Image (cartoon, rainbow, N blue to C red):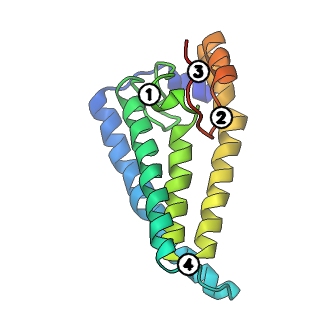
């Protein structure tokens, strides 16, 4: 936890935050989608699993999930970089507790967006293993958030974060309460 606290004390310039995110984009926009599509298809063949063939529904459902997921992911990343003066990466965390924008609907809109977008990709590609890989990746993200990130946020932002945590759902969005 001390390492996370040390990272949180340093604010980075907007140019540096964008440069780091550009490097991370290679992983999240190229390598992980490649793993879902090609790795999932290869794993399906190796395990003798049939293709996830729902006809046009593959593309429709996959497309809808992908678009909704990308919307939440990019919206939350934009807020983290601009209003939060940080990034989604633990070594460059936000300097401000974000409770507006996508963060008023759920505490982890980027994780929600990531899971939806990659699941949509796996469904559109018709790979059962690809969807399974996404769910495993999503489970890892949830364990990381619950086991490390939430504790670090409570340590950094204190009662403000704890009150936010009590009022806003973890990952499944809901309409914000008025008032």
Which of the two discs, 4 and 2, sits closer to the camera? 4
Instruction: Specify whether 26 is left or right of 15.
Output: right
User: How many labels sit on residues?
Assistant: 4
**Badge 2 density bin: few <14, some 14–19, many ≥20, Cα 10 Å:** some
- The reply to whether the C-beta atoms of the residues labelled 3 and 2 are less than 8 Å apart is no
Q: Mark 1: which secondary structure?
A: helix
- The reply to whether the C-beta atoms of the residues labelled 2 and 1 are less than 8 Å apart is no
Q: Which residue is mark 1?
A: 101
* Residue 95 picture location, percent across and down: 46, 20
**Badge 4 density bin: few <14, some 14–19, many ≥20, Cα 10 Å:** few
Give the quarter of the figure containing the N terminus. Answer: top right
What is the spatial separation of the Cα atoms under label 3 and label 1, in whole angstroms? 14 Å
**Badge 3 density bin: few <14, some 14–19, many ≥20, Cα 10 Å:** few
* Residue 50 picture location, percent across and down: 64, 86
Q: Which residue is mark 4?
A: 54
Q: Which residue is mark 2?
A: 170
Looking at the picture, tell me which residue is in the foreground, 178 or 146.
Answer: 178
Instruction: Identify the residue at image location x=56%, y=25%.
Output: 176
* Residue 9 picture location, percent across and down: 49, 19
Give the quarter of the figure containing the C terminus. Answer: top right
What is the spatial separation of the Cα atoms under label 3 and label 4, in whole angstroms? 38 Å
In the image, residue 127 sits, relative to residue 2, either above or below, namely below
Which of the two discs, 3 and 2, sits closer to the camera? 3
State the mark number for residue 177. 3
Q: Mark 3: which secondary structure?
A: loop
State the mark number for residue 175. none
**Badge 3 or badge 4: first in the primary sequence:** 4
Looking at the picture, tell me which residue is in the foreground, 120 or 135.
Answer: 120
Instruction: Identify the residue at image location x=56%, y=53%.
Output: 115
**Badge 2 or badge 1: first in the primary sequence:** 1
In the image, residue 156 sits, relative to residue 74, either above or below, namely above
């Amino acid at each position: 936890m001390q390492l996370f606290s040390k990272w949180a004390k340093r604010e980075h310039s907007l140019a540096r935050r964008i440069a780091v995110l550009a490097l991370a984009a290679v992983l999240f926009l190229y390598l992980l989608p490649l793993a879902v599509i090609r790795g999932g298809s290869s794993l399906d063949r190796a395990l003798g699993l049939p293709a996830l063939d729902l006809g046009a529904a593959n593309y429709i459902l996959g497309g809808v999930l992908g678009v909704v997921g990308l919307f939440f992911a990019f919206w939350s990343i934009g807020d983290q970089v601009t209003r939060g003066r940080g990034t989604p990466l633990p070594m460059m965390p936000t300097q401000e507790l974000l409770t507006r924008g996508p963060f008023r609907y759920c505490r982890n809109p980027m994780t929600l967006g990531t899971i939806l977008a990659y699941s949509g990709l796996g469904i559109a590609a018709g790979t059962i293993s690809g969807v399974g890989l996404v769910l495993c990746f999503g489970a890892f993200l949830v364990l990381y958030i619950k086991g490390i990130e939430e504790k670090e946020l409570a340590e950094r932002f204190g009662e403000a974060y704890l009150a936010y945590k009590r009022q806003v759902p973890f990952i499944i969005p809901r309409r914000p309460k008025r008032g």
